[in-house]
Image (cartoon, grey):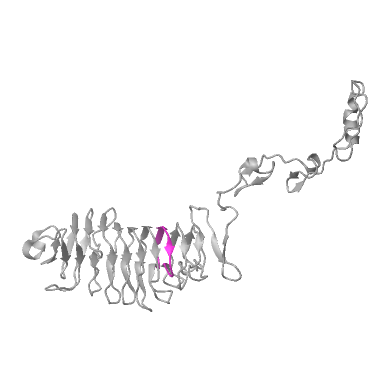
Amino acid sequence: MADIRAAQSGDFSATTTWVGGIVPGSGDVAYANTFTVTVSDTRTVQAISNASGTGITVGGTFSLLNGCNLTCTNANGVVQGATTTACVTTPSLTVGATATINSNISLSVAISNATAINFSTSGTLNLNGNITGNSANATSAAVVLSGVGILNTTGTISGGTSPVGQVVSGVSITGNGTLVHVGNVVGNGGSTTVETCNGIRMTSGTATINGTVLGTGSISNGSSSASSAGNLTVNGTCQAGLYGPAILPGSYNQITRLSGPFLLSTTNNLVAVAALAWRWAPTQIPTYYEVSTSGGTTKRNLYTADNIPTANYPTQGNVRSGTVYGPNLENTGTLAVPAPGSVALGVATDNTTGTAVLTSAAVQTALGAFSSGRLNNVATVDTTGAQIQAAVNT
């Protein structure tokens, strides 16, 4: 593996951009070295960086152009240096333009207001890989969506394990752009301050999460200002962490839509959602809200009447005829259950036993209709029904 630094601003593919005329390849780390390197085609490297190194000056950026596809194979493929200039920027990614980065991104720089990727424009940026905050200084984020574009992400977004009191996030939405994430969102990597270490921190914009939201402060509005607003939709499980809810309060202007289930913390009874208000997500699934019982040692699940799970219901043939049941009252029982008076004494029927008894009077009454036939003398039956005491004339 070689460290190759830029000699001047230019296209990634041009030999004149790099010291020694060597274009970085799959076994190399490419350094911006204070310059602007534009990425216009498909490239694979170990990593890109605007950090310092031997003979390398901190600073510079990799600017994404329409149609580019950059793959970084290191565990952390986008390395941010000790500068507030992002390692990756998007000034040319305007409406209709698309760029893709396939890489894990972990922000480890120890300066405030740092970000590894700043998506500031109106195009579309696809990020495939895990995104982690991990900064040791306040108001930092691995990825910032500061423009009005569409940011598509896959993998896990995490706030990381930053020290107590540092406001760090995996993804920060500060503009009016749209985040669509497929994967989990994880908050709070050890801080007891629930407002820090957010997976996603949003003060505006729109975010749709298709996956599990897990841990304290996984998603936070990040502001109590009445002017702060945004639209958040989570299609998946929300579970509280050790120190607080997964969904933290936003402003009263924020629209929050959640599908659930909503699970308590695995270590205590903290609830999953602390939003000022929330609505059901457009696509509802059978869901529930975990609530601790009075003693706090067990849990019960709360379901809405129209969202009860449909599994494990009895078949209609095993339910009393005429009984209507099911989450939406869509089933009607067909099982005929005779009344106790029609069932022999002591035989189980329904939730009781039969009461019918065979008596001599009943037999005589039943056979009375045959008085003009061949049966002219009816026997009497003793109380046990075991002996015939008279003969039948033929």
Given residues 68 and 374, the one toward you in this image is 374
**Quadrant in which the N terminus appears:** bottom left
Stretch of the chain drawn in magenta: 202-218
Label count reads 0
Give how far across and how far down residue 39 sits, in percent.
Answer: 19, 59
Q: Which residue is found at the position 48% from the left and 52% from the top?
A: 283
Can residue 205 be found in the magenta stretch? yes
Residue at 53 percent across and 53 percent down: it is: 286
Residue 14, position in %: x, y?
11, 58
Above or below, comparing residue 339 to residue 203 in the picture: above
Q: Is residue 230 visible?
A: no
Q: Is residue 392 left or right of residue 185?
A: right
Left or right: residue 22 compared with residue 313: left
At horizontal 28% and vertical 65% (from top left) the residue drawn is 105
Judging depth in this view, the residue of 248 and 294 nearest the camera is: 294
Question: Residue pushed farthest left?
Answer: 20
The image quarter containing residue 152 is bottom left
In this rendering, position of residue 178 left or right of residue 323:
left
Can you say whether 135 is above or below 289 in the image? below
Residue occupying the far bottom of the picture: 165
Q: Can you give x and y, in whole percent of width and height, for residue 122 in the image?
A: 30, 59
Quadrant assignment for the C terminus: top right
The quarter holding residue 127 reads: bottom left
The front one of 258 and 302 is 302
**Can residue 158 be seen in this snapshot?**
yes
Membership of 394 in magenta stretch: no
Relative image position of residue 239 (x, y in whole percent)? 47, 64
